[in-house]
Image (spheres, grey):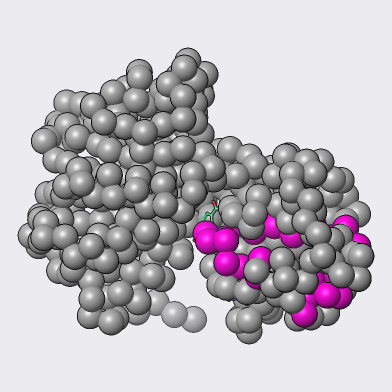
Amino acid sequence: MKYDVADLSLAPQGKKRILWADNDMPVLASIRKRFAKTRPLMGKNVSACLHITAETANLARTLKAAGANVVLCASNPLSTQDDVAASLVKDFKIPVFAICGENRSTYYKHINAAIDHKPVITFDDGADLVNEMHARKIKDNHRIIASMEETTTGVIRLRALANAGKLRFPVIAVNDAASKHLFDNRYGTGQSTVDGIIRATDFLMAGTKIVVAGYGWCGRGFAMRARGMGAIVIVTEVDHIKAIEATMDGFEVMPMAKAAKAGSVFVTLTGNKNVIRAEHFRVMKDRAIVANSGHFNVEIDIPALKKMSKKINRNVRNHVDEYVLKNNKRIYLLAEGRLINLAAAEGHPASVMDMSFATQAMEAEYVVKNRGKLTVAVHDVPVEIEQQVCRLKLNSMSIKIDTLTSEQVKYLASSGEGT
Ligand SMILES: NC(=O)c1ccc[n+]([C@@H]2O[C@H](COP(=O)([O-])OP(=O)(O)OC[C@H]3O[C@@H](n4cnc5c(N)ncnc54)[C@H](O)[C@@H]3O)[C@@H](O)[C@H]2O)c1
C-alpha cells in the first residue's frame, strides 16, 4: 500500500481522536452500518481531497464499508491532523497522502497521487482535485461517475468551469444542500473560528472590537458566536441584502476602510480575494490581529503586508507571525492567512460534520444508483437526501416533531379558503 504521512508512530493518538469523533457522528455511523450490508460502492475507486481530520476519517471508513477503494489527500497544506493520517493508514488500511505543513509542490504531488488512483468518484473541498484533473486532461475523465464538492468556494469554481464549457464530468454541489451549509458553515465555522483564534492568541473576546468581513453563512455564524463571547462585532459586506440583515441582527455595518481603524481583531469569511489590503493595514491599530476562515489564503493581501513590513518575526507564538510595519506598528497574522479554524484548532465539531458527511455518503450512493443519468453540469443534492439526513439527526437527538394532518395537507394544497 502506497501512502505518504508524517509519522506512523502517531497512529494510537489518531485512532483515539477518530473514535472520539465517531461518538458524535451517529447519522454517519448508521449509514456506515447500512453500507456494510448493502455495499453500494463495491469495487469503486474513490479519491477524496478533504481536510484530513478525525471526522473525515469517519467518512473514509464509511466509504470503505460501502465497498469502495478509498484514497485520501489533503485539501489544505495546514489542515492535516498527522496523527489521524497515521491511524488511517495503520489501523484502517486507508492510504493517505497528506502531511501538515507540506509545501505547494508536495501538496500537488499528493493530489496527483489521488488522481493516479484512477477514481470513478471524487470528493473535493475547494475543487483543487477536480481542477487538477481537468488541467492534466486525464484520459480517464469519461469514467468519472460524479464529483462531490464540500465548500462554497469549490462550488463557485466549478460553476465557473461549467459556465466556460470546460467541465468534463457531473459534479454535485454538496455545500449547497440545506443539511450542509445551514449547519456546517454557520455553526461549525462559527464555533471553530472562535476556537482557532483563541487557541492561537489567547486574547479576551469580551469587550474587544472584532471586524467580520462577509455576512454569508460562515460570517453569520462567527459574528453570532463572537457576540456571544462578549465581543463588539462590526460587519463589512458588499451585498446590500446581507448588509441590512447584519444591521437588523444588531451589528454595526461599515466599509473596511472605516472598520480598519476601529477594530482590534479582523476575520475574513468571504471566499473573495484581497478583502484586507495595504490601505487597511496602514490605518490599523498597533497589535491588530488578522485572521482568515475563508477557503483560500487570498482574503488577506499577505504579499502587500510583507512589502509594507520592515521586519517579520515568525512564530512569536504558535500560529502567530508578527509583521512590523515601517511606521513601527505591529500586525499579527494568524496561521499564514489559512483557515484559522483548521490550522490552529480542530475544524468543525464532529456533531456538525456528521450532517455534512452523511449528506456526502448518501450522495455517493445516489450517484452510483443514477450512473449515466447525470448530465455534465453542477447538480444539487436531491431534497429527499437533505430531509433524510435531518430526520436521522433529529432521531439521534431524540427530538420528535409534528406531522401534517390530512386536513392540513389538503389546506396547503388548496386556494379555496380565505378571509
Ligand atoms: N473555515 C471553514 O472551515 C469553512 C467552512 C465552510 C466554508 N468555508 C469557506 O468560507 C468562505 C465563505 O463561505 P460562505 O458559505 O459563508 O459563503 P457565502 O457566499 O454564504 O458568504 C460570503 C459573503 O461574503 C461577502 N463578500 C464577498 N466579497 C466581500 C468583500 N470584499 N467584503 C465583504 N464581504 C464580501 C458576500 O457578499 C457574501 O455575503 C468560502 O471560501 C467557503 O469555502 C470555510
Q: In this view, does 298 lie above or below 47?
A: below
Q: Where is residue 123 in the image (x, y as percent from the top left)?
A: 31, 50
* Quadrant containing the N terminus in the rendered view: top left
Residue most extreme to the front: 310
Specify whether residue 176 is in view.
Answer: no
Q: Does the magenta stretch include residue 179?
A: no
| Along the viewing direction, whichever of 181 and 344 lies nearer the viewer | 344
86 vs 116, left or right, is right
Q: Where is residue 414 in the image (x, y as percent from the top left)?
A: 32, 74
Residue most extreme to the bottom: 240
| Along the viewing direction, whichever of 339 and 377 lies nearer the viewer | 339
Q: Residue at x 15, y 69 (%)?
A: 375
Q: Where is residue 115 in the image (x, y as percent from the top left)?
A: 24, 49
| Along the viewing direction, whichever of 19 and 48 lies nearer the viewer | 48
Specify whether residue 279 is in view.
Answer: yes
170 vs 309, left or right, is left
279 vs 391, left or right, is right
Count all numbered tags in the image, as a single digit.
0
Q: What stretch is highlighted in magenta?
A: 279-302
Q: Which residue is drawn at 58% across and 53% down?
A: 339
| Along the viewing direction, whichever of 77 and 50 lies nearer the viewer | 77
The quarter holding residue 148 reads bottom left
Q: In this view, does 257 lie above or below 146?
A: below
Q: Residue at x 31, y 64 (%)?
A: 131
Q: Which residue is drawn at 77% across and 80% down?
A: 279
Q: Where is residue 358 in the image (x, y as percent from the top left)?
A: 36, 42
Q: Is residue 301 magenta?
A: yes
Which quadrant contains ligand 1? bottom right
172 vs 347, left or right, is left
